[in-house]
Image (cartoon, rainbow, N blue to C red):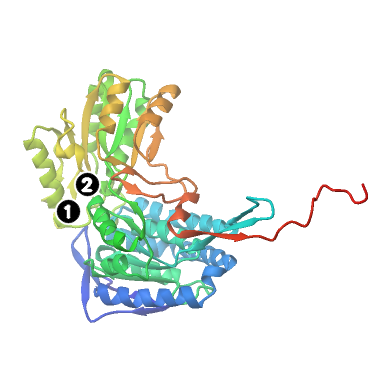
Amino acid sequence: MTTYSAKNWINGGFVSSASLGISINPATYERIGEYPDDGGAAAGSAIEATSRAFRSTAWAHDAELRAKVLDQMALAIERNRDLLIDILSLENGKVRGEAALEADGAPSKLRYWAAMARTEAGRAMQPRPGSLSIVLRQPMGVAGVIVPWNSPIILAVRSFAPALAAGCTVVIKMPGQAAQIASVLAETLAEPSDLPNGVINIFVESGSDGAALLVESADVPTISFTGSTKTGVAISAVGARRMKRFGLELGGKAPMIVFDDADMEPMLPVLEKALTVFAGQFCMTGSRLLVQEVVYDTVRDRLAGRLRNVRGGPASDPKSDMGPLIDKPNVQRVDKIVQDAVNAGAKAIVRGGPITDGPLANGAFFRPALLEVSDTSLPIVQQETFGPVLTIQRFCEETDAIALANDSEYGLSASVWTRDLDRALRVAQALEVGSVFVNDWAKVYDSTEEGGFMLSGLGRLNGAAALDDFIEYKHVALKPGRSGNPHQVSGK
């Protein structure tokens, strides 16, 4: 088997460390390479290089340069598409179609932000006679981007592209579970010939020393973090001491509401995929299914049949429907959550669980689970699982569905299944979430804002609002006076 040696990308160069971590293939648990694992030192070097680049290059002041480089990055990702998909499938465990979906989503985001860089502008106004005010939108400086392991390419691009478009320079921390992906991504992003050294830096670590330095450093005024609510709350508390700007996309517990007039045939495959895409390791995973009484038994039984037939397997097998979890500790964690739920009163319609025999036993595979519940207060209903585990619960009326869906501290996304457009719009407005998908799931676009209510986050990614995490507004007030009455005609 080919082995890889990942590198950090700092100040335009690729560097390693005496301290090394090990990369594995979660489908087989075979060693696939190594990576530098000295996050604190790497972060310190990256912050220094990025701060210098912000002060000494044209990046912060030249919007056309930023747009050109972002366009060049999009082309570089397209050139390296197959390599990115290969390494994402190998190290992240995604089946090939899901890896392709992730890699193919990156170029359009980069081009969107290239266009936004070209159109970025402040505004001017005359608030009083004889006065002129100019409002400038200026980059904040160095942006720290902390990326999770579950979708490392697209989630990195989603944060650093608007930061670069705004004129910030960037330090990206990638997790050890995605070290080889990070290295290949860095090599790809380094291809643009117009990118100044130090504008973008990527380092990897298995722990959190480097991430902590980004959060604590006075030289990093803004942080874009995607990850758990627990970590988001913790880093916000630390950053508050320096009044840092935070963009946070955190946990989710997405309800999928099925009304009695839902179109069953196209719906069921989507509900299945809402649970199994990325093996349920996705912030928008459909993890709560709320079904109206009239169709409850039909939906439960037909979906259970589909989940029993989901074929787990490695990305190398084109027959695989779902890849492994990221590692075996997460398999054990998810299995314990399911067992605790059953012990607390949930009924296992499909128990699911670890694959412990046959050729997949060496990997981190977990069969999907479907649990019937009636008590919304159960941890399995209230807490994010981050695995292929779905609860199903019945409701009678529209108001009941809304109340059940909103009985959560999370508010990232939801889906509504009905042929009644008025009902769909009523429910969408009543749900306390950042995104609602009607008769579909997880439709996210480059130009539409994405983010959560309550404990699901702060700020927005994608869409024009994403710039707000990376800019400061500056008011410049002038008093040039008046040249006279512009409406007065001479001699009259």
Give me the C-alpha separation between circle 1 and circle 2.
Answer: 8 Å
305 or 296: nearer the viewer:
296
Residue at the disc numbered 2: 387
Q: Which residue shows up at 28% across the image and 21% down it?
A: 295
> Can residue 6 be seen here?
no
Amino acid type, label 1: Asn
Q: Secondary structure at mark 1?
A: helix
Residue at the far left in the pictured view: 343
Q: Which residue shows up at 32% across the image and 70% down it?
A: 217
343 or 65: nearer the viewer:
65
Question: Residue 396's spot in the image, x, y percent?
Answer: 26, 19
Q: Residues within 10 Å of mark 1 (few under 14, many from 20)?
A: some
Q: Secondary structure at mark 2?
A: loop
Please tell me which of labels 1 and 2 falls first in the chain: 1
Question: Residue 182's spot in the image, x, y percent?
Answer: 34, 67
Q: Quadrant of the N terminus?
A: bottom left
Question: Residue 395's spot in the image, x, y percent?
Answer: 25, 22
Q: Is the residue under label 2 in contact with that under label 1 (CB below 8 Å)? A: yes
Question: Residue 287's spot in the image, x, y percent?
Answer: 25, 39
Residue at the far right in the pictured view: 491
Q: Which residue shows up at 41% across the image and 46% down it?
A: 450
Q: Name the mark on residue 330.
A: 1
Note whether 203 is above or below 428 in the view shown: below
Residue at the far bottom in the pictured view: 18
Q: Quadrant of residue 40?
A: bottom left
52 or 301: nearer the viewer:
52
Note whether 112 is above or below 396 in the view shown: below
Amino acid type, label 2: Gly
